[in-house]
Amino acid sequence: MFMIEVEIFPHRYLKASTTEKFLNKIYDLKTVERVVIHGQPLPKVITYGPARGLPVNHTERKIIHVKGVPVELTVMAGRFWITLSDDSELDKLDEICKEMFPFGYNLRVGKFLKDRPTVTDYIKYGEDGVFLINEMDRRLIGMVDPRSRMANSVTVVEKEEKEE
């Protein structure tokens, strides 16, 4: 299967409201298969130092809604890796970026995400689990943080299949 990966790198970190609007607009595109948000972590609690264990009340750690699915924003969005099924909507994606990021952005086509199981996938899921992921939903390959539970780090937003 032929897939295209696009990296969108806004010149500023995005607020939760801008991230929500952007994600909803790109999920309207028919060719979007997977979106990965990368950025500065927004922890719930302080993990080290004299204030260890105290809550962090960051204003941008919010629950946003992407196509009706609640998504807890655990990073300050600074980069998006988007997998497209083909290149037919690259111009539309660029137009969305021009509209949403008046301060500037970089858009690159390349290889940014893993497409084969990693050692971390085998550690996290085991050999049987990796086999199941390969058979069921290949979008989960490489989406593993070995220190977190998958429910905390991956949210699946299903696309609506429109009948014509």
Image (cartoon, rainbow, N blue to C red):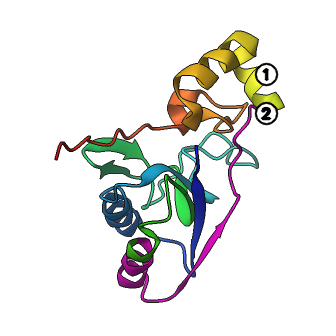
Whether residue 101 is in magenta: the answer is: yes
Residue 22, image quadrant: bottom left
Residue at horizontal 58 percent and vertical 32 percent from the top: 138
In 3D space, how far apart are the residues under numbered discs 2 and 1 (Cα atoms)?
A: 9 Å
Labels 2 and 1: the sequence-earlier one: 2
Residue at horizontal 45 percent and vertical 38 percent from the top: 155
Q: How many marks?
A: 2
Q: Foreground residue, 139 or 68?
A: 139
What amino acid is at disc 2? Answer: Thr
Q: Nearer the viewer, mark 2 or mark 1?
A: 2
Kindly identify which numbered label has been placed on residue 3: none
Whether residue 157 is in magenta: the answer is: no
Q: Which residue is mark 2?
A: 118
Q: Which residue is mark 1?
A: 123
Residue at horizontal 57 percent and vertical 29 percent from the top: 150
Which range of residues does the magenta coloring cover?
93-118
